[in-house]
Amino acid sequence: MAQQESIRNQNEYARQTAVSQARHQAEIDEAQQTAAQAGPLAAAKAQQAVLSERAIVAERNAELREAELIAEVIKPAQAEAERIIRLARAQADATKLSAEAAAAQNRIALDQQVIQQLPEMLRAAAEGLQGANLTVLDGAEGLTSVVASLASQGVALLDSVRNGLTNSAVD
């Protein structure tokens, strides 16, 4: 019995020793695996850092290129557009002034034509009244009133002719 107890104890000791050796071997293997992976892991981390820095550099390059494009293309284009707008405004103002001057000359010419034709118009009105039988009841005041009425009708006729000619000249 003692011998069997001794064999059992030896077997138990051998088992515990094997288990202990297996644990130690597992720890050693794990450490070796970790050490083996440390190199590629460190390389991957270094590559990530490099890629991150490259991304920052690319972003800065893009910002720089954008600033260059603004300075080289957009700003000159805006300045040219502003110059063209100012020229167009100046041309529009000059055209407006020319049109106003031409309209003023047309009005002067129109007034001259009306003035030239005014004696003929008055002669025609006088011929129309030449055979008329006109009775004036108020004496000199009545005659003045009739002449004033004829003059105001003549002015109204002149204004009508002037407006009609001006409107047809504008059209």
Image (cartoon, grey):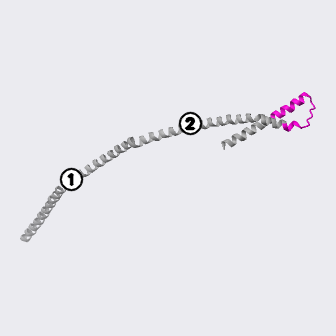
How many residues crowd mark 2 within 10 Å: few (<14), some (14–19), many (20+)? few
Q: List x then y, in percent, for residue 140.
A: 90, 27
Please say whether residue 138 is one of the residues in the magenta stretch.
Answer: yes
Residue in view at x 85 percent, y 32 percent: 147
Residue type, numbered disc 1: Ala
CA gap, disc 2 and disc 1: 74 Å
Task: State whether residue 30 is above or below residue 7.
Answer: above
Predominant secondary structure, magenta span: helix
- Between 53 and 5, the one lying in front of the other is 53
Start and end of the magenta stretch? 127-152
The answer to which of 41 and 32 lies nearer the viewer is: 41
Check the picture and name the quadrant holding the N terminus. Answer: bottom left
Residue at the image position 80 percent from the left and 35 percent from the top? 122
Sort mark 1 into few (<14), some (14-19) or many (20+) by Cα contacts within 10 Å.
few
Position of residue 17 measured from the top left corner of the image (x, y, whole percent): 11, 63
**Badge 2 vs badge 1, beta-carbon distance below 8 Å:** no
Q: Nearer the viewer, residue 93 or 70?
A: 93
* Residue under label 1: 43
Identify the residue at horizontal 68%, vertical 35% (top origin). Answer: 109
Q: Which mark is residue 94?
A: 2
Left or right of 58? Residue 147 is right
Is label 2 in a helix, a strand or a loop?
A: helix
- Please tell me whether residue 100 is drawn above or below residue 14 in the rendered image: above
Q: Which mark is in front, 2 or 1?
A: 2
Quadrant the C terminus occupies: top right
